[in-house]
C-alpha cells in the first residue's frame, strides 16, 4: 500500500463581540488568532488511530471524516495544537475544519472555501447542535469577520491594529453546547428580558464595527458587551470578581467565547489604554495572560 499523507493548519479565534446572541441572529465580530492546530491525515493499515494533544471527547474526528465519506478505519490522524481546549478559542471548530481540509486533500477532493466551511459547520454541530457557525467560519476564513447567521460573511479590513490581553479565568466545567442550551432554557422562561439583552448586545456589536472602521477605541464598548453577557448569565463568579478588579483599574473586560458559570469562564479579553502596565500586573498574579493583536490590513 502506498503511504499517503496530507496536512492542514487552522487557527483559533476570539469573539470581539456577539457571542451567544449570534445564535439568535444578531451579528458577531470574530478575530482569528495566532494559536494553531495542525492536523495530519495518513493512510494506516492498523485501523483508525488518533494521536492527539487535543482531547476529542465528542468524536469530532470521526464525524468530520465521515462527512467526507472517508472510512475512519483506513487512516491515522495526528493533531498537534497550541489551542487550549474548551476555553472559548474555537478548538472544536478548528478540529473539524482541520480534518475536513486535510481529509479532502487526502481523497483529492477540491473544496471551495464555502464547501469547506459548510462541511466543518455540519461536523461541529455534533459538538453542539445549535451552532451559529461563527467558530467554523473563523477557522476556515481567518482574519477579522463580521458574521450574521445565514448571511454572507464580511471580511473587515482595518487600518489600525488593536492590542489586547487574553486572560485565562479557568477552564469552564460546561461545554459550549451546555452554555448555549442553558441560555436557550432561560430564553424560554424569560423571553422578553432575553430579547432586550440580545438587542442591546447587537447594538453594541454594530457600534464596535463602526469604531473599528474609524480606528477609534473599542475598550468601553467591549466592556459594555462584557457586562451584558454577565446579565445574560454566561459568566461565573470567579471571572466576575476578576472583571470588577480590572474595571477599577480602567480596563474594558469581556469573555471571549461561550463563557462558563460553575467554574472558570475561559479566556477573557482585557483592554486598557496603558496595556503594558496591566500586563505586568497580571503577570505577577495568578492568571495566565497572553498578549495578542487584532486587525490591520
Ligand atoms: C462560541 O464560540 C460562540 C457561541 O455563540 C456559540 C455559537 O455561536 O455557535 C457561544
Image (cartoon, rainbow, N blue to C red):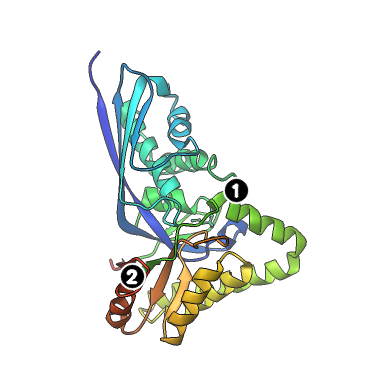
**Residue 169, located in which quarter of the rendered image?**
bottom left
Q: Nearer the viewer, residue 125 or 109?
A: 125
Which residue does the image show at 35% across and 52% down from the upper left?
83
Which residue does the image show at 43% across and 59% down from the upper left?
154
Q: Is residue 263 above or below residue 248?
A: above
Dot 1: few (<14), some (14–19), or many (≥20) neighbours within 10 Å? some
In the drawing, does residue 33 fall left or right of residue 260? left
Numbered badge on residue 2 = none
**Residue 38, located in which quarter of the rendered image?**
top left
| Tag 2–tag 1 contact (CB < 8 Å) | no
Ligand 1 contact, mark 1 (Cβ < 8 Å): yes
Q: CA distance from mark 2 to mark 1?
A: 31 Å
* Residue 16 locus on image (x, y percent): 44, 67
Closest to the camera, between mark 2 and mark 1, is 1
* Residue 89 locus on image (x, y percent): 41, 56
Q: Which residue is the extreme one toward the right?
A: 189
Residue pointed to by mark 1: 130
Task: Determine whether the residue tagged by mark 1 lies in a helix, strand or loop.
Answer: loop
> Quadrant where the N terminus lies?
top left
Which residue does the image show at 34% across and 84% down from the upper left?
273
| Residue 278 shows in this picture | yes
Q: Is residue 41 above or below residue 169?
A: above
Dot 2: few (<14), some (14–19), or many (≥20) neighbours within 10 Å? some
Q: Which residue is the extreme one toward the top?
A: 1
Which residue does the image show at 58% across and 73% down from the upper left?
228
- Earlier in the chain: of badge 2 and badge 1, it is 1
Residue pointed to by mark 2: 158
Amino acid at each position: 500500500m502506498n503511504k499517503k499523507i496530507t496536512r492542514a493548519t487552522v487557527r483559533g479565534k476570539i469573539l470581539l463581540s456577539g457571542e451567544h446572541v449570534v445564535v439568535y441572529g444578531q451579528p458577531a465580530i470574530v478575530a482569528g488568532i495566532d494559536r494553531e492546530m495542525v492536523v495530519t491525515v495518513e493512510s494506516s493499515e492498523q485501523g483508525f488511530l488518533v494521536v492527539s494533544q487535543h482531547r476529542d471527547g465528542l468524536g469530532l474526528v470521526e464525524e468530520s471524516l465521515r462527512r467526507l465519506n472517508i472510512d475512519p478505519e483506513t487512516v491515522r490522524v495526528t493533531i498537534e495544537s497550541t489551542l487550549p481546549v474548551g476555553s472559548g478559542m474555537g478548538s472544536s471548530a478548528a478540529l473539524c475544519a482541520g480534518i475536513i481540509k486535510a481529509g479532502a486533500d487526502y481523497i483529492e477532493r477540491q473544496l471551495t472555501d464555502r464547501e469547506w466551511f459548510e462541511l466543518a459547520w455540519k461536523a461541529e454541530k455534533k459538538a453542539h447542535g445549535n451552532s451559529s457557525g461563527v467558530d467554523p467560519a473563523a477557522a476556515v476564513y481567518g482574519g477579522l469577520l463580521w458574521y450574521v447567521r445565514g448571511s454572507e460573511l464580511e471580511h473587515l479590513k482595518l487600518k489600525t491594529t488593536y492590542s489586547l490581553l487574553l486572560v485565562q479565568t479557568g477552564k469552564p466545567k460546561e461545554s459550549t453546547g451546555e452554555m448555549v442550551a442553558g441560555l436557550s432554557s432561560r430564553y424560554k422562561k424569560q423571553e422578553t428580558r432575553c430579547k432586550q439583552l440580545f438587542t442591546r448586545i447587537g447594538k453594541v456589536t454594530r457600534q464596535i464595527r463602526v469604531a473599528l472602521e474609524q480606528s477609534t477605541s473599542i475598550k468601553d464598548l467591549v466592556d459594555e458587551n462584557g457586562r451584558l453577557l454577565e446579565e445574560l448569565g454566561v459568566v461565573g463568579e470567579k471571572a466576575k470578581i476578576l472583571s470588577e478588579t480590572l474595571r477599577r483599574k480602567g480596563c474594558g473586560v469581556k469573555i471571549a467565547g461561550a463563557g462558563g458559570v460553575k467554574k472558570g469562564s475561559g479566556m477573557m479579553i482585557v483592554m486598557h489604554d496603558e496595556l503594558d502596565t496591566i500586563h505586568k500586573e497580571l503577570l505577577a498574579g495568578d492568571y495566565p495572560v497572553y498578549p495578542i493583536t487584532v486587525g490591520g490590513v
